[in-house]
Image (tube, helix red, strand yellow):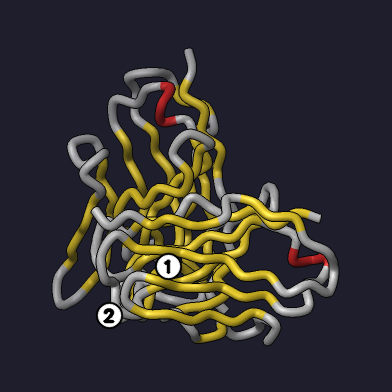
């Protein structure tokens, strides 16, 4: 199985900050990397697909990068509604696997 | 706009079968470009992909090894939905279960509303 490791597991930030979350795959996954945001009691919501493509309707302050084994999710100008948990997920091969999550707190 | 609506019991007894259904609107379970997945989430396991069903000239399934001996995911073309059956459940199967569509680079969107399934006597 491809292991996905996120760092940090949690972080504290303020409104207006720029935040970067890292995701590392245990083997190369090309650009088959997706990012999700999850708020308490809700299903995950797709933000970024294929490493750097913004899902329709997602604000442009979210951006993704990377390829191979190392990926980043950046939130610029953090907004109050961005405080949530973020997950990466590889779509390169089954079993499809997720990172452990990064909780962004105030 | 694709929407997924889950249904099924929230409480299952140990050793029995967990059964959930996901009704699809705005897309077809027989789509040649989508796959229909079940994912669960628990504090101990995080987000765990369980398996999928999809149609590519014929019906296919993929399952996670961790549940492969106990899981069945079936399409129902007459009702445009798909289902999850997980046999011989134990308390470790307690989780929130989600159905979701995968397309393109296996990106999951949209998701069902989630069903908390508790395994307890």
CA gap, disc 2 to disc 1? 12 Å
The image position of residue A2, as x and y in percent, is 28, 57
Q: Position of residue B30 (x, y in %)?
A: 30, 73
Helix, strand or loop at label 1? It is strand
Mark 1 closeness class: few <14, some 14–19, many ≥20 residues within 10 Å? many
Q: Are marks 2 and 1 in contact (CB under 8 Å)?
A: no
Residue lying at the far top in this picture: please name it.
B121
Q: Position of residue A27 (x, y in %)?
A: 25, 64
Residue at x-position 38% and y-position 57%:
A4
Residue identified by numbered label 1:
B101
Disc 2 crowd, CA 10 A, few/some/many (<14, 14-19, 20+) = few
- Front-lying residue, B40 or A84: A84
Q: Is residue A40 left or right of residue A71?
A: right
A55 with respect to B20 (left or right) = right
| Image coords of residue A61 (percent x, y) | 70, 83
Q: From this viewpoint, which residue is outermost toward the left? A: B58
Determine which residue is flagged by label 2.
Answer: B32
Can residue B78 be seen here?
no
Ranked by sequence position, the earlier of labels 2 and 1 is 2
The circle on residue B110 is: none
Dot 1 falls on which chain? B
> Depth-wise, is mark 2 or mark 1 nearer the camera?
1
Quick check: B117 above or below A5?
above
Q: Say which residue appears at 31% left-offset and 76% top-offset.
A: A68
């Amino acid at each position: 199985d491809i292991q996905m490791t996120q760092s940090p597991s949690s972080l504290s930030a303020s409104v207006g900050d720029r935040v970067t979350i890292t995701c590392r795959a245990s083997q190369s996954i090309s650009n088959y990397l997706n990012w999700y945001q999850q708020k308490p009691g809700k299903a995950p919501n797709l933000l970024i697909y294929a490493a750097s493509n913004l899902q329709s309707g997602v604000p442009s302050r979210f951006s993704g990068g990377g390829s191979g084994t190392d990926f980043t999710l950046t939130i610029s100008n953090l907004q109050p509604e961005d405080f949530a948990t973020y997950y990466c997920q590889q779509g390169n091969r089954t079993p499809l696997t997720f990172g452990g999550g990064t909780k962004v707190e105030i | 706009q694709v929407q997924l609506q889950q249904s099924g019991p929230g409480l299952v007894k140990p050793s029995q079968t967990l059964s959930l259904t996901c009704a699809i609107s705005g897309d077809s379970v027989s789509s040649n470009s989508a796959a229909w997945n079940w994912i669960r989430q628990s504090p101990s396991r995080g987000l765990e992909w369980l398996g999928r069903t999809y149609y590519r000239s014929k019906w296919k399934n993929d399952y996670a090894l961790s549940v492969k001996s106990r899981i069945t995911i079936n399409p129902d073309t007459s009702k445009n939905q798909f289902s999850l059956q997980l046999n011989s459940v134990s308390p470790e199967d307690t989780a929130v279960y989600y159905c979701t569509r995968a397309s393109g680079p296996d990106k999951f969107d949209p998701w069902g509303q989630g069903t908390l399934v508790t395994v307890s006597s």
